[in-house]
Image (cartoon, rainbow, N blue to C red):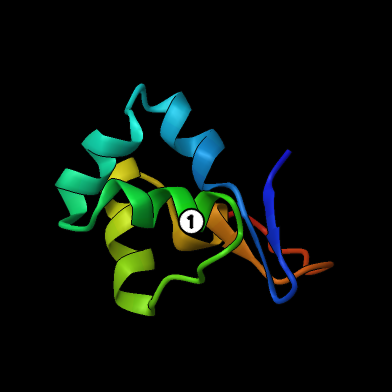
């Protein structure tokens, strides 16, 4: 199940696992701590726009594939 923060639904864990990366590997790639990745995945911390863009780039997807507003529907291009 996707992590849920009251203002944000995230699928970071699913995308990270699909890419075959550990939390530590993803953290190192985007220059944050493993704990930061963990707190984002668990809906405790909402990443900055810059970090969200870095995560998406590292995982080869769009930001909207990682993070969405609850109930929002976005079409893929």
- Tell me the element at label 1: helix
- Pointer 1: what residue? 39
Determine whether 49 is above or below 65 in the image.
below
Q: Is residue 54 left or right of residue 15?
A: left
Res. 56 in view: no
Res. 31 in view: yes
Residue at the image position 57 percent from the left and 64 percent from the top: 44
Q: How many marks?
A: 1
Q: Position of residue 16 (x, y in %)?
A: 42, 35
Q: Position of residue 73 (x, y in %)?
A: 77, 64
**The N terminus sits in image quarter:** top right
Taking the view exactly as shown, the residue that stands out farthest to the top is 20
Q: Nearer the viewer, residue 75 or 68?
A: 68
Q: Nearer the viewer, residue 75 or 19?
A: 19
Residue at the image position 27 percent from the left and 41 percent from the top: 26
Taking the view exactly as shown, the residue that stands out farthest to the right is 71
Mark 1 surroundings within 10 Å by alpha-carbon count, few (fewer than 14), some (14 through 19), many (20 or more): some
Q: Position of residue 52 (x, y in %)?
A: 38, 66
Residue at the image position 37 percent from the left and 27 percent from the top: 19
Q: Nearer the viewer, residue 5 or 64?
A: 5
Residue at the image position 51 percent from the left and 68 percent from the top: 45
Q: Is residue 62 left or right of residue 57?
A: right
Q: Quadrant of residue 28?
A: top left
């Amino acid at each position: 199940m996707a992590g849920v923060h009251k203002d944000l639904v995230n699928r970071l864990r699913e995308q990270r696992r699909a890419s075959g990366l550990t939390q530590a590997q993803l953290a190192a790639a985007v220059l944050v701590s493993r704990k930061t990745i963990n707190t984002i995945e668990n809906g405790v911390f909402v990443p900055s726009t810059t970090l969200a863009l870095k995560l998406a780039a590292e995982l080869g997807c769009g930001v909207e594939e990682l993070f969405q507003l609850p109930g929002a529907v976005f079409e893929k291009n």
